Image (cartoon, grey):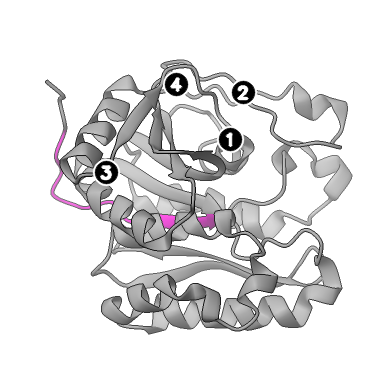
Amino acid sequence: MTTTTSTDRLLPTYFISHGGGPWPWMKKEMGDAYAQLEASLADMPRQIGRAPRAILMVSAHWEMPAFTVQGNPKPPMIYDYGGFPAHTYQVHYDAPGSPEVARRVVDLLEAAGLPAAIDAERGFDHGAFSPMAAIYPKADVPMVQLSLKRGLDPAEHIALGRALAPLRREDVLIVGSGLSYHNLRNFGPQAREVSKAFDDWLDTAVVGATPEARVAQLLDWASAPAARIAHPREEHLIPLMVAVGAAEAEAGERVYHEQAFMGGIAVSSFRFGSV
């Protein structure tokens, strides 16, 4: 039988822009390019007000035929990037896993009619370990990754979030990790206008709309201004759907925003639920 711990105060959920590759270990090379993002991530523990029992991280960098949760108690590292300095292939984020939380996730998904599996070997990818190096640099909070489902259907991932919502009362922090703008072929100053157009729409849909309208707009995200320029492939946006689904009736707030990230990109992160 799975043991859960309930608390009277729901944890919020987050959709974070996680940055590029192993950026926390490249400050010498990148200067202050990530200073604002790092500060926003480092502020999350203060916002939450307590250390959660575990993190459930839904990373843009893991897709499976069915929703799959990481069951490894000591996850290794997955260096899923290329062209970075040699030392970034030796970095470690040694947070423990949580087979107990993994089993609870599977139970919740199966109860909701969503097929689910456990991967006992899977390690941490950079969509998880890079932002977590800023959020919990001591790696002292257990973390479990959960995959996206191939096909990247927004409705399926909102349904995933709904199924996971009970975890918020069980002191498990749900984090969707992607990027609000992800077009590596159109990056930098030349993407200033298109990234702003999509980011403005996203803020209006996520923060300004009623919960019902928010879901409807996110389901139709591809019709947004510059949507397919911002996301030629939507794997970095879909984690947002999970965070929204898990806090469907609650307000959204933009907790990080830059107008000129990496020389011109408009990017944002969002929190759902009160703190």
Q: In the visual, does 235 lie left or right of 210?
A: right
Amino acid type, callout 4: Pro
Amino acid type, callout 2: Met
- What residue do we see at 40% from left, 71% from top? 219
Residue on which the image places disc 4: 96
| Contact (Cβ within 8 Å) of mark 3 with mark 2 | no
| Contact (Cβ within 8 Å) of mark 3 with mark 1 | no
Alpha-carbon distance for marks 4 and 2? 12 Å
Query: Secondary structure under badge 4?
Result: loop
- As drawn, the label of residue 93 is none
- Point out residue 196 in the picture as x, y percentages from the top left corner: 67, 80
Mark 3 crowdedness (10 Å alpha carbons): few <14, some 14-19, many ≥20 = some
Amino acid type, callout 3: Leu
Residue on which the image places disc 1: 129
For the magenta stretch, what is the residue range? 5-16
- Point out residue 13 in the picture as x, y percentages from the top left corner: 36, 55
Query: Secondary structure under badge 2?
Result: loop
Mark 3 vs mark 2: which is more N-terminal?
2
Query: Secondary structure under badge 3?
Result: loop
Residue on which the image places disc 3: 114
| Contact (Cβ within 8 Å) of mark 4 with mark 2 | no
Q: Nearer the viewer, mark 3 or mark 1?
A: 3
